[in-house]
Image: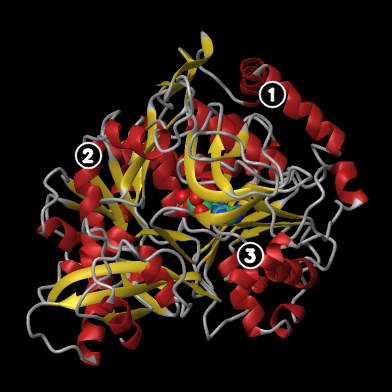
Amino acid sequence: MSDTIESILQEERLFNPPTEFSERAYVRSGREYEQLYSRAASNPEKFWGELAEQELHWFKKWDRVLDWQPPFAQWFVGGQLNISHNCLDRHLHSWRRNKAAIIWEGEPGDSRVITYGELHREVCQFANALKSLGVQKGDRVAIYLPMIPEAAIAMLACARIGAPHSVVFGGFSAEALRDRLVDAEAKLVITADGGFRKDKAIALKQEVDKALEHGAPSVENVIVVQRTKADVTMTAGRDYWWHELKPQQSAHCPAEPMDSEDMLFILYTSGSTGKPKGVVHTTGGYNLYTHMTTKWIFDLKDTDVYWCTADVGWITGHSYIVYGPLSNGATTVMYEGVPRPSNPGCFWDVIEKYGVNIFYTAPTAIRAFIRMGEAIPNARDLSSLRLLGTVGEPINPEAWMWYHRVIGGGKCPIVDTWWQTETGGIMLTPLPGAIPTKPGSCTRPFPGIVADIVDLDGNPVESGQGGFLVIKQPWPSMIRDVYGDTDRFRFTYWEHIQPKEGQYLYFAGDGARRDADGYFWVMGRVDDVINVSGHRLGTMEIESALVSHPLVAEAAVVGRPDELTGEAIFAFVSLEGNTEANEDLKKELVKHVTAEIGAIARPAEIRFTDVLPKTRSGKIMRRLLRSLASGQEISGDTSTLEDRTVLDKLREG
Ligand code: 7RM
């Protein structure tokens, strides 16, 4: 890990945008970027107000662009719009009506192309199906689906009738699903019999049944998409098939005029303490910000085929598979599969098959491709590509170089995009025709974003120094609340850094530095969040899962560096009484965590220990555990350790 940081700090390579790219880009030079940036900074309300007027359809214009009562922002106050209308209806009055909105490729090789006209019809019919089951404006609807078009259709249908959605990643277990259903008090769940992943059919409806058995009393109905044709149990009066319910419905369903600040969705994300937080996003600001970032960062044109490989269960799927691209009238590719032993080149096949021009993926995927060897992508025609992107974690410069050379053929700019579930959209990124890139840096803030690196008192640190990444001004797609827990919203994001005199800084939870050119280099989380393959997991969540096993007395979980996944989960576990520590029990605990949370939380390593290193006041000293987990010598102060012999015991472990 320290090697990586060293090499990042010394990175000096600079890649200018190719002239052919810049000439045709929305933002064509560093000078144009600077102009946009200073226009936004000097008068944000004018900047966002003009864009909102030019780029979106409003049923009613706003009275005020911004109302900022820190930490509560309201954007486009008094305005009314509907994001489903902006993603669909307004494209129907032009040639885009018959343009591909979604190109979908299933893992087994089946596929569908859905035009804007067809997508509109599907969404309207399904929105009416939701209404027929009594779903009303304001009711929360959970979506637990594989990567099939119905996921996007369900999201847009909820948005159309004003029912906030809560998409739960299909890889989460029944228990994790139940927690989210309970927290959001979801009225209805949309799921599928299953989905295909790594050549196997994964059961989903079965997980929903389990979640409901264990108690999620708010759920009244379940709608089930038929995907794998697996046997499922349908409970009469509660469960309905999508393919039986939807076709009976009218394709006429006007979009509900929503107040700009009406809730659009809740999305759960891990933090350093407690259960996952329900991040609340609202309508107008989110629509505008994801629209503008998609347009300028991906330089999206009507002739492009755009593909983001995320799952709709994550914020990247919400903002950059569904809402941002469709609001722009773009063609967005959805792929059900992941690279797997039977088809390690499947991503390149999809690019070749559909002539993908813009490709957005995660560093962990790139590192996996590097391992598989460049012969695999080299055997496909990737010449349609003109722009590449990454998201989810810092990208190591060597992976960046490989991506640039092997996938981009040396001619595609790379946008390394830093952002979070909470920010709703991309915050730090190059604009590809304007900003020269450096491998490993997410470069500069998007126009309208005022970012800085500060110490705990909110004072900016010197260039080249590490500090906390903060955002100093409100932006349209910012988190509005933690669902049902405003105290947690304040505490997590707005009280960690304490500047003088009522100044409010949004704290992202990341450490970063800025170089002499003003480029940002994000180093990773500074809290107890582990980033495994770009997925956020709270150490405490995993610890709670372990401790819920009857033989576990105590557990401490840390991240250790991993070449492939960025970080891997390392769990220190002490057992109850005289329980015998053995390999079988390790396996059982791994299974237990998978059942409690899902496969993404699977510990890479479990080490049994009699005791955990604690301070005299009883706090687990994670810093020491992190060193142990990564096989490093323990450095720094250990004087607060209650029992010094613990360290020797742990090393032997
Ligand atoms: C979009 C997303 C957010 C956390 C964030 C960072 C890390 C994301 C980058 C990155 C370095 C990047 N949402 N992160 N992108 N670190 N460079 N380009 O990932 O809420 O799931 O995670 O991911 O630590 O705080 S997220």
Q: CA distance from mark 1 to mark 2?
A: 45 Å
Q: Quadrant of residue 33?
A: top right
Q: Position of residue 467 (x, y in %)?
A: 56, 46
Q: At x 91% / y 50%, what residue is drawn?
A: 20
Going from N to C along the chain, the mark reached first, 3 or 1, is 3
Can you tell which mark lies on residue 5? 3
Q: Position of residue 174 (x, y in %)?
A: 22, 62
Label 3 vs label 2, nearer the camera: 3
Q: Which residue is mark 1?
A: 40
| Disc 1 crowd, CA 10 A, few/some/many (<14, 14-19, 20+) | some
Label 1, secondary structure: give it.
helix
Label 3, secondary structure: give it.
helix
Amino acid tagged 3 = Ile
Position of 583 compared to 558: left or right? left
Going from N to C along the chain, the mark reached first, 1 or 2, is 1
Amino acid tagged 2 = Leu
Q: Which residue is mark 2?
A: 133
Going from N to C along the chain, the mark reached first, 3 or 2, is 3
> According to the image, what is the colour scheme of the structure?
secondary structure
Position of 522 compared to 586: left or right? right
